[in-house]
Image (cartoon, grey):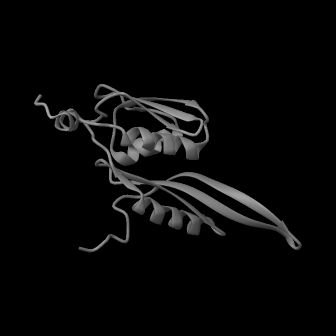
Amino acid sequence: MSTPTKTESPEQVVQIRRCACVVKGGRRFSFSAMVVVGNKNGRVGWGYGKAVEVPLAVEKAVKAADRNNIQVPIVETTIPHQVVGRYGAAKVLLMPASPGTGIIAGECVRAVMDSVGITDILTKSRGSNNPVNLVKATFNALQSLRTRDDVARLRGVEI
């Protein structure tokens, strides 16, 4: 069994930050990148990388995203039920939508939903609008999703 070296699908860069360190000769810049990677079929991960050049930071973030993957239950083209995810001061509300609705979301949450393969969803972000915290709150919400079969199995009942 070999581990894949390259991701199944292209990464989506959520945010690139530039940090300046003032030294004797001037400013020395470093960059950080927040990346979301998914196979558009229920598998998605996020990564954060730092480097002195933007491409190196993105590469590090993609490697981190490959290590930080989760499996998301998808019912047809949406999620099984309404859920709220929290991280820090950021809150993200995810609601299932009927087919044809599309992804109604902000830039950060949209990147995650597009990467996971959900095409019909309604979202609302409350509190902090920090992109890093929004992505982490979205992942918190996606991790708490359960299908009807999962809940029935956990409770020991039949549907």
The x and y percentages for residue 4 are 33, 70
Up/down of 15 relative to 105, above or below: below
Judge whether 16 appears above or below 112 on screen: below
When the figure is inspected, residue 149 is found, relative to residue 95, above or below; the finding is: below
Q: Nearer the viewer, residue 159 or 136?
A: 159
Q: Can you name the residue that lies furthest to the right here?
A: 24
Taking depth in this image into account, of 142 and 151 the one nearest to the observer is 151
Q: Position of residue 126 (x, y in %)?
A: 56, 29
Left or right, 138 with reference to 153: right
Quarter of the figure that contains the N terminus: bottom left
In this orientation, which residue lies closer to the viewer: 62 or 92? 92
Instruction: Please report the residue visible at 30 percent of the width from the left and 34 percent of the height from the top.
Output: 78
Q: Give the left or right position of residue 17, taking residue 73 as reference.
A: right
Q: Residue at x 40, y 62 (%)?
A: 66
What is the quadrant of residue 5 in the picture?
bottom left
Q: Residue furthest left?
A: 158
95 in relation to 28, above or below: above
Q: Position of residue 123 (x, y in %)?
A: 45, 30
Q: State the residue lying farthest toward the top.
A: 98
Q: Where is residue 151 in the image (x, y as percent from the top left)?
A: 22, 34
> How many callouts does the rendering have?
0
Tell whether 143 sits left or right of 18.
left
For the C terminus, give its image quadrant.
Answer: top left
Taking the spot 61% from the left edge, 35% from the top edge, the residue there is: 128
